[in-house]
């Protein structure tokens, strides 16, 4: 399976504890393509939610259902970064364009207090 940065993939997570993500849901792959092509068995992703209220949280990115491939408006929750086994990732729902990925990168940089130079 070829996994690329910017892919939206479905994954089944365990039952949630507290505010951690759970159940079957889409995630956005944010690990680099070099990392994704390696023999390392994991990929880094951020969780996507249908809870549109989370759009108001700093750094989160609203995705239009018509363009994301998800079929409904959703929010990339940049504060929920997860490491996943590549084998657990199932079908691709879509892919983000460069502009949307840039917004996600800026959101992750905000959460992790990283410089946003580009």
Image (cartoon, rainbow, N blue to C red):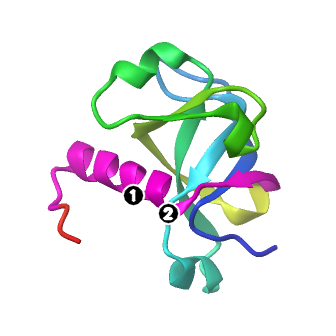
Task: Give the residues drawn in magenta, as a range.
Answer: 89-115
Alpha carbon distance from label 2 to label 1: 6 Å
Q: SS at mark 1? A: helix
Give neighbour class at mark 2: few <14, some 14-19, many 20+ (Cα, 10 Å): few
Locate residue 41, reporting x and y percent.
65, 72
For the N terminus, which image quadrant? bottom right
Give neighbour class at mark 1: few <14, some 14-19, many 20+ (Cα, 10 Å): some
Magenta span has 94?
A: yes
The reply to whether callout 2 and callout 1 are in contact (CB within 8 Å) is yes
**Looking at the rendered structure, which numbered label has been put on residue 98?**
2
The answer to whether 66 is drawn above or below residue 93 in the figure is above
Locate residue 29, reporting x and y percent.
58, 58
Say how many tags the image has: 2
Foreground of the two, 89 or 108: 108
**Looking at the rendered structure, which numbered label has been put on residue 102?**
1
The answer to whether 12 is drawn above or below residue 9 in the figure is above
Foreground of the two, 7 or 31: 7
Q: Say left or right for 40 vs 107.
A: right
For the C terminus, which image quadrant? bottom left
Q: Say left or right for 27 vs 102.
A: right
Magenta span has 37?
A: no
Q: Residue at horizontal 55%, vertical 39%? A: 47
Q: SS at mark 2? A: helix
The answer to whether 23 is drawn above or below residue 81 in the figure is above
Locate residue 98, reporting x and y percent.
50, 63
Locate residue 40, reporting x and y percent.
59, 79
**Looking at the rendered structure, which numbered label has been put on residue 90?**
none
Q: Give the farthest residue toward the top.
A: 53
Quarter of the image for residue 15 reads top right
Quarter of the image for residue 107 reads top left
């Amino acid at each position: 399976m070829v996994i690329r940065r910017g892919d939206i993939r479905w994954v089944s997570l365990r039952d949630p504890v507290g505010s951690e993500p759970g159940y079957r849901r889409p995630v956005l792959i944010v690990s680099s393509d070099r990392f994704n092509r390696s023999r390392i068995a994991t990929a880094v992703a951020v969780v996507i939610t249908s809870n549109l209220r989370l759009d108001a949280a700093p750094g989160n990115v609203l995705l239009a259902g018509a363009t994301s491939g998800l079929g409904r408006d959703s929010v990339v929750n940049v504060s929920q970064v997860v490491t996943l086994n590549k084998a657990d990732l199932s079908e691709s729902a879509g892919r983000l364009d460069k502009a949307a990925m840039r917004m996600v990168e800026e959101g992750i940089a905000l959460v992790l207090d990283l410089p946003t130079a580009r």
